[in-house]
Structures are given as C-alpha cells and as structure tokens.
Image: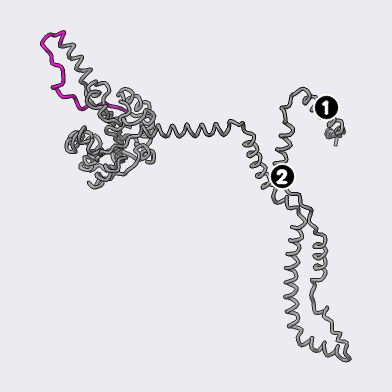
Amino acid sequence: MAGVASPPVEQEPDSVDLDAVLSQLKERVAARRSSGAYPVALEAQLAEHFQRLIAHRKQEPPPQDSYLGELVDQLDGRSDFGLHKVSYDSGVPGGDALHRAIGKVVARQNASVLQQLDHWAQLVNEMLKVLAHIATVPPRHFHDDMWKEVDGVLQRMADVERMEAGGPAAVASLAARVAALEETAGKQSFDPWYSNDAFETAFRGSREEMLDRYADLADELVGYDPVLDIGCGRGELLTLLAERSVPAWGVEIDETLVSGAVAQGLDVRRGDGLASLRDAAPASLGGVTLIQVIEHLTPQQAVDLVALAADRVRPGGKVVIETVNPQSLYVYAHAFYVDPTHVRPVHPAWLLFLFEQAGFASTVIDWRSPPPEVDRLEPVGDAAHDANVERLNQLLFAAQDYAVVAIR
C-alpha cells in the first residue's frame, strides 16, 4: 500500500566457526594455567565434583517398543466383531444349512455376546495404546524436577565436604559457647524454696493491710471495666474491684499465688502478663493495672508494655502503674533491695515520657507511701538550719512509691 513502509528485512546472522572459538578457549585456558591463575588441583576437584553429581544417574537403553506397537496395530485390525464374520462351513454335506438354521435361532444371543466382546476389545485396545505411549516416552521426561532436586542436594553436600578443616572445630566451639551461656543463664535464674505469699506478708504487709492500702486505686477504676491486673499476686486489687462490681481478671506467674486467688473465687490465670496483654483484642480493655510489677521488667519490656496498652485499652480507658520511687533515697535502704527479683527502679519522668509518646491523653502522678515521720529529720528552730533540714527530708524521705494514672 502507498505510504506504508515495508518491514525491515531480517539479516541472517553470520555463521560462527565453533572450531575457532574452541581453539581460542583452549589457548586462553592454557595461558591462565601456565600463569598460575588457577588454584592447585582445581581441575581434579571439578572433575571429582562433576562425577559426584552425575553418579546417581544410570543410563538405560531406550525401550524396545516396536513389537508392542505392532501388536497394537494388529489388535486394531481384529477388534471388529459381527455376525457377518461367523462361518457356517461345517465340512459335512447338508451341514451348512443346519448351521444357518441354528444360527437364526440363537442370533439374538450371539449378537449380545459379540456386543460384549466388542466393548471389551475396545477397552483393551485403549489400555494397550496408553501402555505403548508410556513405553515410548523416555523415563527421564517424568523425573526432571526430581533430578534437579537431587542435584541441588548433592551440590550442598559437596559444599559441606569442601569446608575448611576448621569447620567442624568451629561448630564444636560454638556448641561449647552455647552450653556455657545456658549454664550462666541457669545460675542467674531465681527459684526460691520459700513462698511468695510468705515474702509479701513479711515485707509488703498482710492481706488486710493491702486491701486498705489499695482501696483508693480501686476507686480510680470504677467505670473502666474490664480490667486486666498484670502480676495480680494474692489478688487484693481484684477483691477490691469485685466489691465495687468492676469486672476484672488477673494474670500471675506464681502457681501457688494463682491457686490461692482462685480459691477465693477470683478470676486469676497463670501466665505471662505481657503475653496476656498482647493476646487481648485491640481496644477491648477498659483498664490495665500493674501494682509493684514494672520494676521487675527490663527496659524493653516496659516500652513494649506501654505500646501494647495504648492499643489494647479503648479510648478513654485507664492504665494504673504503681512502683517504687527512685527519687526517694529512703527506698534503697528499706524497700527496693529487699526483693532480689527487682531489675531496676523506673524513674517517674521516663514513665510519663513513655505514656505521652504513646499518645495517652493525660497522665497524673499519685505520690504514695510516705516514710514514717519518726524517721524524718527534725528542725531545731534556726531558720537556715531548718531550711537545709527540709531539703534533706525531701531528698531522703520522699514518698516511697508513686502511681502513674494515664488516660487513653
């Protein structure tokens, strides 16, 4: 057509002289070998590696299927059954007429038998065709993927065999280091023979004292159900919440404390508090409490705790965390180091920072558990002296605990 350019004519590629290319490659390999570019025994290693890869492949002669094909062709030519092919020649005078007469009588039965034979022959023919086809296809056609997998395994085995002599020694050294680490971790674990119930009674107070101490925090949680109390201990806070008709449940790792709380009719489950908070559905909780627990956590666990609380507590919900106050030097001599499972004190400024960064709407600090007045320094009547005494009292005898109350 006018105005339409003809398609470009493809040029035949120039012929390649394979002999010349192979000759150049051989010369280049020889030159590199003479210059020492190849590691010693490289060719022997490659040849050994190649033999290892192909050793599992057995060359089998192609199947002799020509005779099977001839049989199938013969079956095709003889599978046509019919009454017209039935011979009535008996070789006896008058016998042909008799056979024909009998054939007419049993014609219907013969036709049924021939029909069944014809159907059977067709099925046999189809089956033989399939068998002949399978026999003519090389077996490797069906196993290419399997051979590739085997090659890959053998390749990795060869890589292991070529490891440096120090490989097994390095593995043994690593195993020894892991064993040493496990031994060290075992020494750092703490499994006392005394009960936590006895410890809390001796150093925190009786159950009745705890009920009196935490009544105000229970009041903070009215209307913020359901409440998850992490590290609920003997269940004092859960008891106070139940008295205020606040649905709540607790998680405690100590089996004895769990059994005691359950015996009181409280919903307490044994487990990890962070894991339980993580398993809760988003925005499914009205409140989360940790009473004297966060000082047992690592810094990373504390960060994770606040982030999880920000997701699992519904908007408007409340998180209450009480812990020892590191701004009071009094606690180091009387409270913090009494418990050997304390990791480190948590500074209130850092805890407030975490809640603000996690998007909580407001945070308030409730300073709690002031030291006994008898332990405080007394003024003597001199203004300058008494001012210094008050400054020392604030440093030495600040509140022993504080509670952060954060609104989501």
What are the residue bounds of the magenta stretch? 361-385
Residue 289: x and y, percent? Answer: 29, 35
Locate residue 370: give its quadrant: top left
Q: Earlier in the sequence, mark 2 or mark 1?
A: 1
Query: Quick one: 36 or 258, which is closer to the camera?
Result: 36
Question: Quarter-wise, where is residue 72 in the image?
Answer: bottom right
**Residue found farthest to the bottom:** 94
In the image, 163 versus 230, the foreground residue is 163
For the point 75% across and 77% down, the residue is: 114
Height in image: 130 above or below 121? above
Q: Residue at x 55, y 31 (%)?
A: 170
Q: Which amino acid type corresponds to the residue marked 2 in the rendered image?
A: Ala
The residue carrying mark 2 is 55
In the drawing, does residue 57 fall left or right of residue 383? Answer: right
Residue 205 position within the rendered picture, expressed as x and y whole percent measured from the top left: 19, 34
**Along the line of sight, which residue is nearer the eye, 103 or 35?**
35
Q: Is residue 11 visible?
A: no
Which residue appears farthest toward the left when viewing the image? Answer: 381
Q: CA distance from mark 2 to mark 1?
A: 30 Å
Give percent across and percent down for residue 30.
Answer: 80, 27
Quadrant location of the C terminus in the rendered image = top left
On the image, which quarter does residue 38 sit in? top right
| Residue 9 numbered mark, or none | none
**Membership of 14 in magenta stretch:** no
Secondary element at image label 1: helix
Q: Is residue 185 above or below residue 31?
A: below
**Relative to 124, does residue 55 appear above or below in the rendering?**
above
In the picture, which quadrant includes the N terminus? top right
Observer-nearest residue: 65 or 172?
172
Say which amino acid is labelled 1: Glu
Name the disc covering residue 27, or none.
1
